[in-house]
Image (cartoon, rainbow, N blue to C red):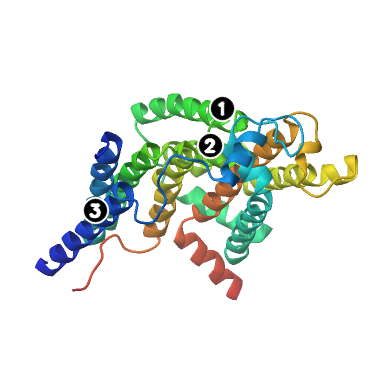
């Protein structure tokens, strides 16, 4: 009834979900960025299982490379630790 | 803390339930293996070499640049507008750029480890060749101009981190050069889009009139250049440290 690739998809995307939760709860912005890259990698695997290789190629380069660099540049212009609460 | 965990777990459960309902029970009617008429049209026409063809076995690229070509064309314009917007917010004129360069020269010189630099050199060569193969084979295999261009921008970023921005600027990767290369890529895209009108009397973006796969190949190469150098332009201007910006802008006030 449940096919193997759908099961792998569910596991991979759940891992991505967990990592996005961890990234949101992290107060060190650089660590949050690393966690969000891990989440993007899991989602890229999910896209691959969904047979969308075009998206995988763009998504990995943007989410792990360009997005991370842009956010690091933004963090370098402000503070590294989130404060408050 | 406890409330967060409850929220996260309930989101996860709802998400799994929806995924299960869509994938196994087919509640939205998205499943099934039969082709819809539109999909059949794309599959039968993309590589047909007659009629509304794209001369391309890669149907995704054919859709992105031919059947839905205007979407991608305007997406390129939106990317252009975003980059021009960022440039006009963060602009520095000739004199100010010179001041910024002088201030950068006074910063303490730091260097990455030999291991990091040597590894980066090897990895960058690999990324550049893979990005070229993604972009130049865009009409044959998965990938295309945007994918290849963003991979290429990542390679440049690695150089940026391992060797510093100043080294790259000394080697000729200055703001003026990247903007010129970006304009060149956009010009290639525009030329390919308008070529059917002037050469064959067709319509804008009717690239199936061009001989063979020239249309898709040119558009991929143009997008590759445009995306690579568009990203690089932004990284070069954002890479100027904040205090230099402040010093230069304060001088402007005086």
Mark 2 or 3, nearer chain start: 3
> Left of B225 or right of it: where is B119?
left
Q: Which residue is mark 3?
A: B16
Question: Residue B27: percent from the left, percent from the top?
Answer: 34, 56
Q: Are marks 2 and 1 in contact (CB under 8 Å)?
A: no
Q: Residues within 10 Å of mark 3 (few under 14, many from 20)?
A: some
Residue B229, image x and y in percent?
61, 44
Q: Residue at x 27, y 54 (%)?
A: A20
* Mark 2, residue position: B152
Where B144 falls versus B98 (above or below)? above
Q: For mark 1, what is the residue?
A: B133
Q: CA distance from mark 1 to mark 3?
A: 37 Å
State if disc 3 and disc 2 touch (CB < 8 Å): no
Question: In the image as oriented, which residue stretches furthest toward the left?
Answer: B2
Question: Residues under labels 2 and 1: Cα distance?
Answer: 11 Å
Upstream in the sequence, badge 1 or badge 3?
3
Specify whether residue B254 is in view: no
Q: Which type of secondary structure does the marked residue at label 2 adopt?
A: helix
Q: Secondary structure at mark 3?
A: helix
Residue depth check, mark 2 versus mark 3: number of the one nearer the observer:
3
């Amino acid at each position: 009834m449940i096919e193997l690739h759908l099961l792998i998809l569910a596991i991979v995307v759940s891992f991505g979900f967990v990592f996005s939760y961890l990234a949101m709860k992290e107060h060190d912005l650089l660590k949050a960025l690393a966690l969000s890259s891990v989440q993007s990698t899991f989602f890229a695997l999910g896209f691959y299982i969904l047979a969308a290789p075009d998206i995988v190629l763009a998504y990995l380069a943007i989410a792990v490379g360009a997005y991370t660099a842009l956010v690091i540049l933004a963090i370098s212009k402000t503070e590294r630790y989130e404060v408050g609460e | 803390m406890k409330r967060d965990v409850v929220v996260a777990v309930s989101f996860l459960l709802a998400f799994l339930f929806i995924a299960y309902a869509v994938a196994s029970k087919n509640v939205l009617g998205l499943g099934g293996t039969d082709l819809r008429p539109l999909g059949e049209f794309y599959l039968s026409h993309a590589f047909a070499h007659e009629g509304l063809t794209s001369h391309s076995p890669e149907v995704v690229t054919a859709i992105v640049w031919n059947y839905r070509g205007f979407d991608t064309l305007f997406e390129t314009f939106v990317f252009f507008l975003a980059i021009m917007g960022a440039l006009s917010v963060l602009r520095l004129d000739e004199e100010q750029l010179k001041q910024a360069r002088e201030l950068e020269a006074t910063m303490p010189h730091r260097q990455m480890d030999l291991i990091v630099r040597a590894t980066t050199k090897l990895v960058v060569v690999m990324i550049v060749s893979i990005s070229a193969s993604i972009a130049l084979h865009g009409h044959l295999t998965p990938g295309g101009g945007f994918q290849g261009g963003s991979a290429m921008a990542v390679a440049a970023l690695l150089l940026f981190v391992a060797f510093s921005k100043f080294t790259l600027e000394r080697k000729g990767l200055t703001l003026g050069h990247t903007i010129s290369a970006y304009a060149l890529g956009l010009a290639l895209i525009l030329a390919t889009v308008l070529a059917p009108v002037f050469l064959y009397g067709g319509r804008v973006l009717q690239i199936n009139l061009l001989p063979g796969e020239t249309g898709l190949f040119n558009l991929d190469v143009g997008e590759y250049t445009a995306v690579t150098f568009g990203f690089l332009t932004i990284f070069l201007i954002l890479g100027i440290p904040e205090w230099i910006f402040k010093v230069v802008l304060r001088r402007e006030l005086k």
